[in-house]
Amino acid sequence: GIAAIAAYASGPGLGNEIFRGIASLGSANALNQVLAGTIGIVILALLFDAAYILLGRLTIPRGIRV
């Protein structure tokens, strides 16, 4: 989600693809740009979530896990 919000602050990120696609609604590639940015953000979020889960499993002792 932060990747999309960063585009408002003129930062680099996949949010730029989304906003560029929204700005050019009606053109041939507008939907493709929006989907590329959205799918990229979703994939990035899933990868970071998997990394945090793996990190938690490696660092939390087995007796403490719920």
Image (cartoon, rainbow, N blue to C red):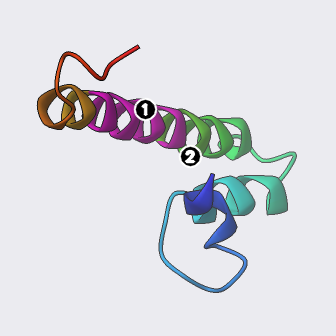
Residue 56 locus on image (x, y percent): 26, 33
Element at label 2: helix
Q: Nearer the viewer, residue 29 or 56?
A: 56
Q: Is residue 65 magenta?
A: no
Q: What label does residue 20 carry, if any?
A: none
Real-space CA distance between mark 1 and mark 2, rounded to the nearest whole angstrom: 10 Å
Q: Which residue is mark 2?
A: 37
C-beta proximity under 8 Å, tags 1 and 2: no
Q: Nearer the viewer, residue 34 or 64?
A: 64
Q: Which residues are magenta?
A: 41-53
Residue at x 49% of width, y 66% of height: 13
Q: Kindly report the secondary structure that dominates the magenta region of the rendered protein.
A: helix
| 15 sits left or right of 44 in the view | right
Q: Is residue 16 above or below residue 63?
A: below
Mark 1 or 2, nearer chain start: 2
Q: Is residue 58 above or below residue 36?
A: above
| 58 sits left or right of 53 in the view | left
Residue type at mark 1: give it. Ile
Q: Which residue is mark 1?
A: 43
Q: Is residue 40 above or below residue 22?
A: above
Outermost residue to the right: 26
Q: Is residue 13 above or below residue 28?
A: below
Residue at x 18% of width, y 17% of height: 62
Residue 57 occupies which quadrant of the picture?
Answer: top left
Residue 43 locus on image (x, y percent): 43, 32
